[in-house]
Image (tube, rainbow, N blue to C red):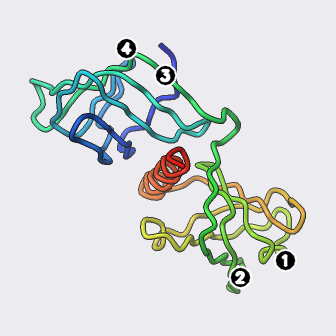
Amino acid sequence: MRFPRPFLGQSVRLRAEGFDDLVEVVAVDEDGSIVLAVTLTAEEAHLLYASVASAVHLTGAVAAEEEGPGRSRFTAADVETFQRREAYRVPMGVPATVRRGDGSELACKVADLSPGGALLSPEADGLLLGERVELVIHHDMLRELPLPAEVIRRDGARRALRFDALSVRADNALSRVITEAQLRHRRR
């Protein structure tokens, strides 16, 4: 079964009877099973996470690993992906600050967010195509993680940013925020 694999260290949402929490990916085996940093056994479980290409929802079973204490192996039986595109985007509407190369800052909002970039509100219309900036998103998990980016597109008065190479910490936090936002929107 083929599906976009989570990366090592990524936080993913694991749901099973009596359990619903973010857990860390410890390993992804060639057969597609995913080792998680949690001890859990459930015949029916759901694993949700954001990849560069989509949001992924796996249905399957999870079993506690005998070899590694505090670890479980998730084996997928069914795969569902959402919004296949260059990068999965979720609506956000959260405040942000853009730090420009000259040291000035611009207050705006993140209209939508993906692992690959962000679409900013019209307050960011002064940004120039090709300009390199840092985006600070005022969200608990991202507040202290400036995201280096380049302005790649104008969408009316809004500006689209593409993130440069992110640190593992920033990439993991971004993935968690996107996964949680996607889950909130699915519940509506």
Give me the C-alpha separation between circle 2 and circle 1.
9 Å
Give me the C-alpha separation between circle 3 and circle 1.
42 Å
User: Percent from the top left, x then y, of residue 182?
Assistant: 53, 48
How crowded is the residue under tag 3: few (<14 C-alpha within 10 Å), some, or many (20+)? some
Disc 2: which residue: 106
User: Percent from the top left, x then y, of residue 53?
Assistant: 62, 35
Disc 3: which residue: 79
- Disc nearer the start of the sequence (3/2): 3
Of labels 3 and 1, the one closer to you: 3
How crowded is the residue under tag 1: few (<14 C-alpha within 10 Å), some, or many (20+)? few
Q: Secondary structure at mark 3?
A: strand
Q: Quadrant of residue 63?
A: top left
The residue shown at (31%, 43%) is: 24
Give me the C-alpha separation between circle 3 and circle 2.
41 Å
Give me the C-alpha separation between circle 3 and circle 4.
14 Å
Q: Quadrant of residue 128?
A: bottom right
